[in-house]
Amino acid sequence: MEYEVVIGLEVHCELATNSKIFCACSAKYGAEANEHVCPACCGMPGMLPIVNKRVVDLGMTAGMMLNCHINRKTTFDKKNYYYPDLPAAYQTTQLFAPICVNGRVDIETSKGKKSVRIKQIHMEEDAGKLVHDDWRDLTMVDYNRTSVPLVEIVSQPDLSSAEEVVAYLERLRSLLRFAKVSDCRWEQGSMRCDVNLSVREKGSDKLGVRTEMKNMNSLAAITRAIEYETARHIDAIVNKTEELVQETRRWDDEKGKSFAMRTKETAGDYRYFPDPNVMPVVIDDTWYNRIKDSLPEFPEVKKARYMDELGLGDFDATSLVESRAFCDVFEAAYAECGLAKDAANWILKDCANLLNRNQMTADMLSIDGRALGKLIRLVADEKVGRANAKFILAEIFAGATDPEKIAVEKGFIVSNDTSLIEKVVVDIVAADPKSVADYKGGKEKAFMALFGKCMRELKGNCNPQVLRELLLKEIDKA
Amino acid sequence: MEDLLDMLEKVNQLSLTDEEKAVAAGYFAATEKDFATFSAVDTDGVEPMVHVMPLENVLREDVSSQPFTREDLQKGAPEAEDGYWEVPRLIE
Ligand SMILES: [Zn+2]
């Protein structure tokens, strides 16, 4: 008998907003405990939620990126349960009319192409964070994350291997980051995933007993958990090692095992009902079209355009479309200088270096792309030397917008005055007869030493080709 | 009715006396009767009402502000330390 695994995912992504979903508290990650709280997100009685418009913008954007139908009238509901990370004892979410339904995500694996259906995307608020203090035997509660806006993306059970799950999650992450819906950082919990899994006889249309693993936060752990659960289910079916029950299980990545948690309350126990405090949101054509018009090209479309129209190689194009920020800077720089390959190099090598040195990720690149384009033009026109251009790039990285002004102020503009170069060459050659003799004796390195001295004397502001010729001529004379 | 009351008692973390249960059962019986009345009405072709108030799009711009301090908010807390609210330990 052959078995197959059937997997559906619920993916939570924190939305890239400034403020929370129902109050004006900051939604930024990384503050001191309970710095970003107010009576509303602390669940104080009598507080009224007011929906953040940007959350609806981003919910719609997510849906459009995933080929969903957008519900033009969308409403919020209360999901009730008691837990200290949920101060109001209910979560405001969407059950009856979620913002998006019926979407599709296309993935590709070693087995070929596949479409994964999206059941729905709903907007909701995140819960707080609990820190368990073993020493004092109590639990500490941080409400900074309470009411931070999320979208939950619910797939149909269309996935049938860990490889497909990883491909699906990577595709989701790429699309959502590209559309600036979420920064999707697993390590900060801004992307999390619940895995629903069951096993059945191959070809059967009846689903087996389903188990759920909640709050998975890395692709490696998800892969291991799926492999473990699949084996456990098959073992239970074939060898009757245990009776499978529908339940929520906790994945322990260190032990490499899943463990049963207390039986999950059934959906009825959450007593969902329409939230009377949140008015329905109606999306008119103007709003809908504003979001539609703001969607970015899909990464693979951009990549093809970079290669076909701008002549970039596969590696450069692939690397650029890893990050929407890279693409934005690249396109602005290219529009300014018209040099695609140079622009790609400056971003993928020099900007990437600066990001690295500042412990920043690619998505955090926020330099003025036009300024970079101007700088590339200055270098291409041989008005600024490459070493000095790197210095100017660091200034642009720190916020500068006018590279030419910096070049003039710092004395970086390459002199076309060959008499100045000649004078330097004559002085250097006269002052270093040993290097001249060495070079004439066949030591190539000695030439580079002389060349370097001249460059330093000229502060890098000369055309290397011109310097080379003048220097060779002067050495000949010596 | 018995089952419903048991479930609600459990999920709301209450523990009701038999007397309280009898009172609650009375309320629920009356509510069930009201719903039976509603259910008898022919609602074919009636658009479901999503909200009792004729209001929509009560929205705010995405601007953050922090007018309350955590000290203000934790004044009424039975236990708070180092900026955290503290609650009895939860078993996973
Ligand atoms: Zn708040």
Image (cartoon, rainbow, N blue to C red):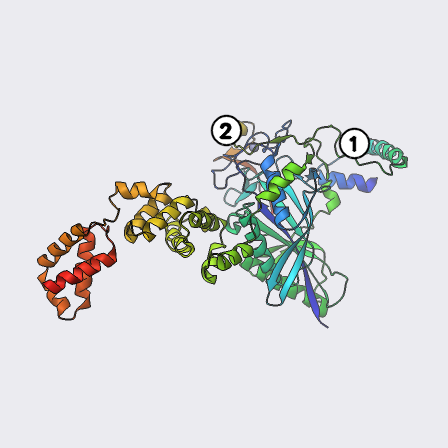
Residue A165 visible, this angle: yes
Q: Amino acid at mark 1?
A: Glu
Secondary element type, mark 1: helix
Q: Amino acid at mark 2?
A: Thr
Badge 1 residue CB within 8 Å of ligand 1: no
Q: Nearer the viewer, residue A32 or A261?
A: A32
Q: Position of residue A375 (x, y in %)?
A: 35, 48
Q: Position of residue A124 (x, y in %)?
A: 63, 41
* Residue A149 sits in quarter: top right
Residue A376's mark?
none
Q: Relative to A306, does residue A32 appear above or below in the rendering? A: above
Q: Relative to B80, does residue A360 appear above or below in the rendering? A: below
- State the separation of the CA atoms marked 2 and 1: 40 Å
Direction from residue A444 to residue A206 in the image, left or right: right
Direction from residue A29 to residue A267 in the image, left or right: right
Image point (60%, 52%), residue name = A193
Q: Residues within 10 Å of mark 1 (few under 14, many from 20)?
A: few
Residue A257 visible, this angle: no
| Labels 2, 1: front one | 2
Residue B20's mark?
1
Q: Relative to A171, does residue B87 appear above or below in the rendering? A: above
Secondary element type, mark 2: loop
Question: Which residue is labeled 2 in the image?
Answer: B69
Q: Relative to B38, does residue A403 appear above or below in the rendering? A: below
Image point (10%, 59%), residue name = A432
Q: Closer to the N terminus: mark 2 or mark 1? A: 1
Image point (73%, 28%), residue name = B54
- Please state, as top left, top right, bottom left or bottom right, where the N terminus of chain B lies in the image: top right
Report the chain holding disc 2: B
Q: Position of residue A116 (x, y in %)?
A: 66, 57
Image point (72%, 55%), residue name = A246
